[in-house]
Image (cartoon, rainbow, N blue to C red):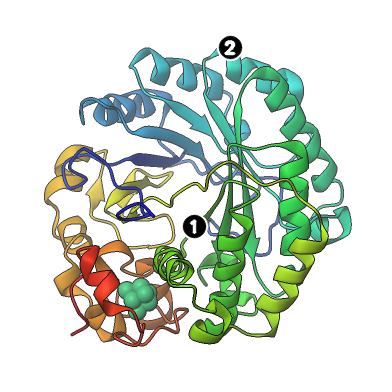
Amino acid sequence: MQTTPIRTYRHDVSARPFIVIWEMTQACPLACLHCRAGARPARHPGELTAAEARDLMAQVAEFGPPPPLFVLTGGDPFQRPDLSDLVRHGTRLGLPVAVSPSGTPTLTAGRLAELRQARARAISLSLDGSTAQIHDRFRGVPGVFGWTLDAWQAALQLGLKVQINTTVTGHNLTGLADIAALVQHLGVASWSAFLLVPTGRGALLPALTARQAEDVLNFVYDAGEFVPARTTEAHHFRRVVLQREILRSRGADHVAVLGLGELYLRLRERLGDLGLARRKARRPPANVNAGQGFVFISHLGTVHPSGFLPVAAGSVRTGRLADIYRASPLFTGMRDHGKLTGRCGACEFAPVCGGSRSRAFALSGDPYAEDPWCSYQPGTFPYQADLAAMGLRPAA
Ligand code: SF4
């Protein structure tokens, strides 16, 4: 086993983020049940203009090499007529640019070819069910599943990398293995299981319990043998990866030690039944968290540690992004594990996890509170010496 199965970055993440996400518009023709952005049909008159967007990209380039990945999200980025121009401008500045479009009829092979010509590197698409019935109901419009699959295949043919994002809620919990099978069948650069943050319209959806989240994350670990699986807003996946690697090296039964439940056993059985091909190696998860390697800029130009954390540290209209990222109290606080409270504050895994600051804020109003969708009790993992050997301090 390698020293730690968590990916860290050579550069200092307090000086330069790994990824910058810009919500270029909130306009979107879909009405997804979980929408963070609370997307609406029309563009907001206060969106960053094309000139302000070019200035934003210059600000991102000011972080210096290696440049952060610059992701254009929405809403639906295709609702902005200057999308391809802005992608082209970003790539001219040396930024690796990715686009996160909505699955709509405008997501045609021709539009994707324009993005490729503008030298976009990748797209990410949402897939929340392995069938049209499940996915279209969640996305609120019939046909989204088919448009998404068509775009997925067209993007691959054009040489774009594709990331598939799956929002995990009660509606698709038991179908996750079948989504993994579809992901392997069509091919992706990565598949990310997103644990809902109850904000925007997502606040109205039934929440997972912490035990269900534990079962899902252990399933995602298993799925990593077959697809390049990762997570979004599930930072305790990194704790699960460390636990599973140690338990495997010790020959211990992870179901018993981690107290996994019926949901995990069902998902694992279904994954086994699907007969998927194994990957040569796992993809280690990256140690990125809100404000720690990650920054989000809203459609109005406000700067946030995460798109799911509606607390702003400044604006790219009135300040410089690098200054806000490096020195604002909110961003420096997000990178200070000593500020965490509750179980996250006491946890030996905090340096590689830290919990979802967005979910903590959504459910408690305190961005430093414990992540309520994690069930781990600090200090209870039985192989503490193995954690210490990885440089993790004992639980407080
Ligand atoms: S208690 Fe907090 S820091 Fe510890 S594993 Fe859970 S979410 Fe991560």
- Numbered disc 1: secondary structure: strand
- Asked if residue 262 lies left or right of residue 270, the reply is left
Measured as percent of width and height from the top left, residue 55 is found at 30, 26
Measured as percent of width and height from the top left, residue 253 is found at 54, 79
Which numbered marker is on residue 193?
A: none
Quadrant for ligand 1 reads: bottom left
Measured as percent of width and height from the top left, residue 321 is found at 22, 39
Residue placed under numbered mark 2 in the picture: 117
- Asked whether 335 or 220 is in front, the reply is 220
Q: What residue do we see at 44% from left, 50% from top? A: 284
* Marks 2 & 1, CB-CB < 8 Å contact: no
174 is higher (above) or lower (below) than 137:
below
Looking at the image, tell me whether mark 2 or mark 1 is earlier in sequence order.
2
- Asked whether 244 or 337 is in front, the reply is 244
Mark 2 closeness class: few <14, some 14–19, many ≥20 residues within 10 Å = some
Mark 1 closeness class: few <14, some 14–19, many ≥20 residues within 10 Å = some
- Asked whether 82 or 104 is in front, the reply is 104
- Asked if residue 61 lies left or right of residue 148, the reply is left
Q: Is residue 37 visible?
A: yes
Q: Count the marks: how many?
A: 2
Measured as percent of width and height from the top left, residue 370 is found at 33, 80
Residue placed under numbered mark 1 in the picture: 232
Q: Amino acid at mark 1?
A: Thr
- Asked whether 300 or 202 is in front, the reply is 202
Q: Is residue 365 visible?
A: no
320 is higher (above) or lower (below) than 267:
above
Q: How far apart in space, not on screen, are marks 2 and 1 (Cα)? A: 29 Å
